[in-house]
Amino acid sequence: MVHRELPWSGAVLLNLFAGRGRAGIETACHCDVRHDSCGNLLHGKRRKGAEGWSEASFCLIRRLGSGSCFRPFIAGEWCAMKVFVRFVLMLTVISILSLLLGISLVEMGVPPVYYLYVVVIVLIVSLFSAGSILEPLEELRDAFQSVVSGEIRTVTPKSTDEFGELAKAFNWMVEELRKEKESLEESERRFRSVVEEMDGWLFELDSHYCITFASPNFRDKFGDVQGKPVRDVLEHFPVEKLESGKFEYEIIKDGKITPVEVIVKKDGGTYRCLARDISTRRKIERQLAFFREILEHSVDAIVILDVDSRITVWNRGAEMMFGYTAEEAVGKPLNFLMPKERWQQCTENFKRAVVEGHVKDIEAPRIRKDGEMIIVDQTLTSIHDSNGEVIGFVAIMRDITRRKKAEIELKNTCEELERRTREILEVQKGLQQLASIVENSNDAIYSVNLEGKITSWNRTAERLFGWRRDEALGMPASKLLPEEIKGETEFIIRRIREGESGLRFETRRLRKDGVVIDVEVTVSPLLNEMGELSGISIITRDISEKRQAEREAERRMLKYEVERGRVYFADSFDTAVDVINDLIRCGYNGRVISRRYPEVLGIEEGNHLMLSAKKRDGTLEPDPDRIYREILNMPGWKNAVLLDIDYLLIKRNFEEVYELIQRLKDVFFVLNKGILVVCTESELLGEREMKLLKMECCAIKSKKIEMPAEIYEILRFVYAQNRVGERPSIKDVMTNFGITRNTAKKRVAYLAERGLIKMIKDGRMKVLEVTEEGREVMRVA
């Protein structure tokens, strides 16, 4: 605050201008007067006492007489005092002149009219003098009253005396007042702007919870609320929560509920409250909660990354898909889920997401916590802030492993069809249309639904089986099966449901004319758009001639009368081992499942599985289900299996073993899996159980040959080698049978003398070849 001392005379005048009269003069006489920069008068302590005009006058005379008014306040105060000196001198001179004139006029005997004339002259001179003094004062008084009424007005100094100084002081006061007024108006405007634009309603409460102040927007909404209790304006307002400093409350107005957050600041007995509408915030919070629920309960993996591609958010779908918890995944780069060879591609995808905004349909492999590789369909999107700067990424991944497997299986089926089509095209190069190729193909292609009904049928199937397309569609697929394998369709569908795919085996089919033919069948699952099994696709090739030749060759080469697709029973372990070894020599894939050691059986260790309760390499638990799965998973259909059930009967009851043999019989018979020999020398079986086994299995019969067995074995060996284009030497015979050179020569000579084989010189080596007579012997055998 800036203070400036005024002359004592100025204080008198200002008090006079303000309309204070005698009290104003008294104030000027008994107090020091100051004013601030805003033009406000600052008074000292007023002396108590009489307030009349005469006392004020005596006070003025005392100040003039004592000379206290001539104190050197400032340099211009002497000039300010001259007006009073002139005023007093003028009155004194006029009075003396009037007195002298009156005395002289009395002495001269002048008539009274002259006295009246003198009085008028003196009055005129006095009025003129007073007017010259009071005119500036009246002008200052009018200007002061204008200022008091709010109008900024200045005066023009017309002299350089004390009135000019007073006018300058007044103008300075008015200028300071104008500046303060403008500053106050600017502050008020800013405050009003802040209050009006404030996001909320501002109001104040006194200690009785009555509203003492309300912002304009509060008054616009609730009307004139000044002095009203807050609960009359805001129903059920929780005044007890004012001391907490912050609380939430719901305003009910015109049936509409508005949630607000009230922030309170207590200042003595006053509560300054700011109520902000939080409807939008609550709506955003609900939306965030909704999105949070979607994020947490989505089956897709939703991962949020920072600009360095490090994981910041890992939802529950990602936990289920990859096996990592949020604590394990957050902070790691996204490429820890990828094979190293995909890291560079991942970097390129992030660059594209920055440039293009998102990258869709990224099919890529990902690695689960347990090491399993899965295929995901990923969408990568960049996240921007309000300035358009990239602040992170969101990756949404969906597991499409099953779909990709189905696509691969379908692709494999198509490739199989294409392979067969290429084979047909090589034979039928002159044909230009695929329909003609299928027409002349040896492959019959048809499909069967889960009810066992035929749903598609190509022309080759018409030719192979004899039924026309209109006859075959909707016909039960079991009509294509011979009586002994009527359950093949249900068996195959059950296997497909269990997860088997790409079944391929040799079996038999029944033509319309009742002829049974040998076929090679490839079965593939058909999936609908949901990835569920809807049927099976069957590709059938007629191999009757091939199977007839193979059966003829096996009949010639085998020592025993056994047929593929059958289960045989042997009560002698030596016989069973001899049958298996004979089949292995004829090209079968041999497998012996027994408690006996391989060296005791005389078979190679690689073809042996030891039945044992202890889990070790090369062992198999004596569990019927495990044995069934082991035999079922053997590849191909030329399998020779010896199942020793002695140890199994000790660990399991007969009913379980008997059920296992029945299940294996179905597998070998329907899928033409090979030959199964069941063997037991156990005395645990009674007559009934032994009879049941023999009824379920075929008996093994050996061929009758009119030559020593060891010589026949050599003839069979040479015959088998000749069939594959090889001609063995004497050394090969020695190696294969483990005999000496002389023994080998004697046995070969025996066969040569009877014209069954002949020796041919091949370079410096002699090789063996079966003659026509030898082939005839093998054919008869």
Image (spheres, rainbow, N blue to C red):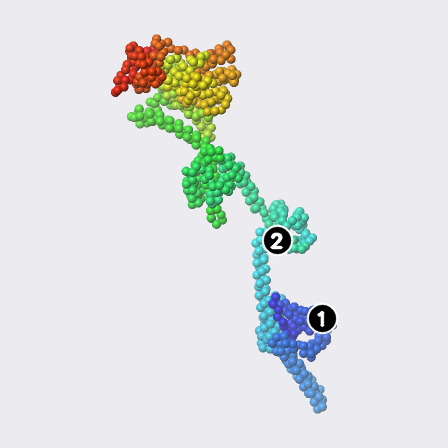
Q: Which residue is mark 1?
A: 47
Q: Tag 2: residue type?
A: Leu
On screen, residue 225 above or below 659: below
Q: Is residue 472 visible?
A: no
Q: Is residue 598 visible?
A: yes
**Regarding mark 2 in the picture, which secondary structure is present there?**
strand
Quadrant placement of the C terminus? top left
Which residue sits furthest top? Answer: 706
Q: Which x, y percent locates residue 45?
A: 69, 69
Q: Which x, y percent locates residue 2?
A: 60, 67
Q: Earlier in the sequence, mark 1 or mark 2?
A: 1
On screen, residue 388 above or below 115: above
Residues packed near mark 1 inside 10 Å, few (<14), some (14 to 19) or many (20 plus): few
Indicate which disc residue 153 carries. none
Q: Quadrant of residue 704?
A: top left
Q: Tag 1: residue type?
A: Arg
Q: Quadrant of residue 133?
A: bottom right
Residue at figure coordinates x 46%, y 33% from the top left: 372
Instruction: Tell us which disc is closer to us: 1 or 2.
Output: 1
On screen, residue 685 above or below 187: above
**Regarding mark 1 in the picture, which secondary structure is present there?**
loop
Residue at figure coordinates x 36%, y 27% from the top left: 418
Residue at figure coordinates x 59%, y 51% from the top left: 200
Q: Which x, y percent locates residue 117?
A: 67, 85
Q: Are marks 1 and 2 in contact (CB under 8 Å)?
A: no
Question: Which of the two residues, 152 or 30, is positioned nearer the viewer here?
Answer: 30
Q: Which residue is mark 2?
A: 202
Which residue sits furthest right? Answer: 49
